Amino acid sequence: MIEKSPTMRFLRTFAVTFGALVTVGIAFLGGYVLGSERAPALGPGFDVLVQAQAVLSQNYYGDLPSAQAQAYGAVRGLVESYNDPFTIFEEPGPRRLEQDKLAGSFGGIGVSIQRNVDGDVILTPMVDGPAARAGVLDGDVLIAVDAQPITASLTSDQIALRLRGDIGTAVTLELRRAGRTAPFSVRITREQIVTPSVDWRVLDAQHHIGYVRISIFDQRTSEELQAALAALSAQATDRLVLDLRGNGGGLLDAGVDTASQFLPNGIVLREVRRGGTTRSYAVRSGVKPAVAWPIAVLTDGGTASASEIVAGALHDYGRALLVGEKTYGKGSAQEVHELSDGSSLHVTVAEWLTPNGHQIDKTGLEPDIPVTPTAQDRSDGRDPQLARAEAWLSGPVTATVTAATRAAP
């Protein structure tokens, strides 16, 4: 996914539908405005929606959904009519989790949760996190949060939302522990929990090869990558494996910043909007210890969106070879429009192309060195893609990868 920070106007076309529904006694969301600008009049055809809601509310046998549930259902139906898997509606809870993920940090207690075969919610506290310091142990069963029972119907996201909150606020967990006859309570103060997006290490000191894995492009990725490359450079690294496998994207700006750390100049991507208007995103300036390093980028079917922006830009400039499997093929950009109750609309607004104009949407990027792991590889814990990239970087790669000063396509 690519999320673009809006300058932004609220998406208004459907919002006014809810204003019309209010006239039949339903307290829906109302029209969205920016400043004093009012939403346009209800479009033709939407009177059917108003009529259908009136029929349902007057004749349905059984409990009626809440006004909010009806409003959310109507929004989802409208969004689905656009037949675009990336234009979506997010309710406030999932939107908050998404924002936390893209921020790279959140207010929480530092635990991971998982249901066992019996349906119990098992906690695993992070080392030296607030939950661990409060006495939570690996394997504790979560029974309730602030006296609200954890039921079998709750999803992991719903439980996570109960555990998260503003930094400095407290939450009380009721737990069950093996070896203890009765449940007990633990009160924990929430702290900032950082979720790093960049992992790095020296892969092969003899051949000066470093390894960097980026799991998501969030608000912290550029800073974390800078620190990783500086640390690798200090350890005499001058070749790199950049692992983008399973990275489904994130923030466009973070992708541009990431590619910019490996390119001296030029553009990172081209964007085509409705009506054919285009925009180019230039390579950004900054400290670039890896700007001339040969790079092998690891890709697979989970490499998508902002990851494909990075891989495509480095490949177009001859800065990297792609090793692994064909990428997903998501070449569209979404703007996120925050709605008044904390929900959001993610709207596809553009298609992007690599610097040389290569289309990614529905086509993806083909690897220069195809490597597909077998079931036996996975069973034995082998990583043939990483091994192949390391082998290539161990050889005379300078003749294969174009110099960093190559002109922009």
Image: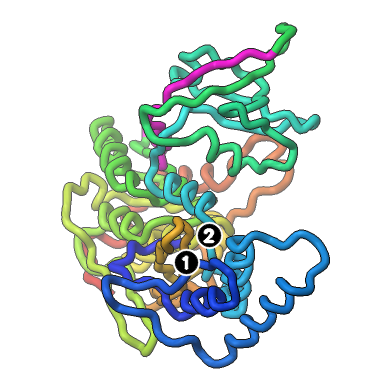
The mark found on residue 346 in the picture is 1
Dominant SS in magenta = strand
Give coordinates of residue 99: x percent, y percent.
43, 50
Instruction: Determine if the magenta segment contains residue 155.
Output: no
Crowding near pointer 2: few (<14 within 10 Å), some, many (20+)?
Answer: many
Above-or-below relation of 139 to 156:
above
Q: Which residue is mark 2?
A: 90
Label 2 close to label 1 by CB (< 8 Å): yes
Residue at 66%, 33% (x, y): give it.
Answer: 114
What is the span of residues highlighted in magenta in the rendered image?
A: 183-206
Instruction: Determine if the magenta segment contains residue 190.
Output: yes
Of all residues shown, which one is farthest toward the bottom? 44
The mark found on residue 216 in the picture is none
Residue at 40%, 66% (x, y): give it.
Answer: 337
| Helix, strand or loop for disc 1 | strand
Give coordinates of residue 230: x percent, y percent.
24, 37
Crowding near pointer 1: few (<14 within 10 Å), some, many (20+)?
Answer: many
Depth check, front residue: 25 or 191: 25
Above-or-below relation of 121 to 383:
above
Residue at 50%, 61% (x, y): give it.
Answer: 304
Give coordinates of residue 289: x percent, y percent.
22, 45
| N-terminal label among 2 and 1 | 2
Above-or-below relation of 337 to 200:
below
284 sits left or right of 355 in the view: left
Separation (CA) of disc 2 from disc 1: 8 Å
Residue at 41%, 64% (x, y): give it.
Answer: 336
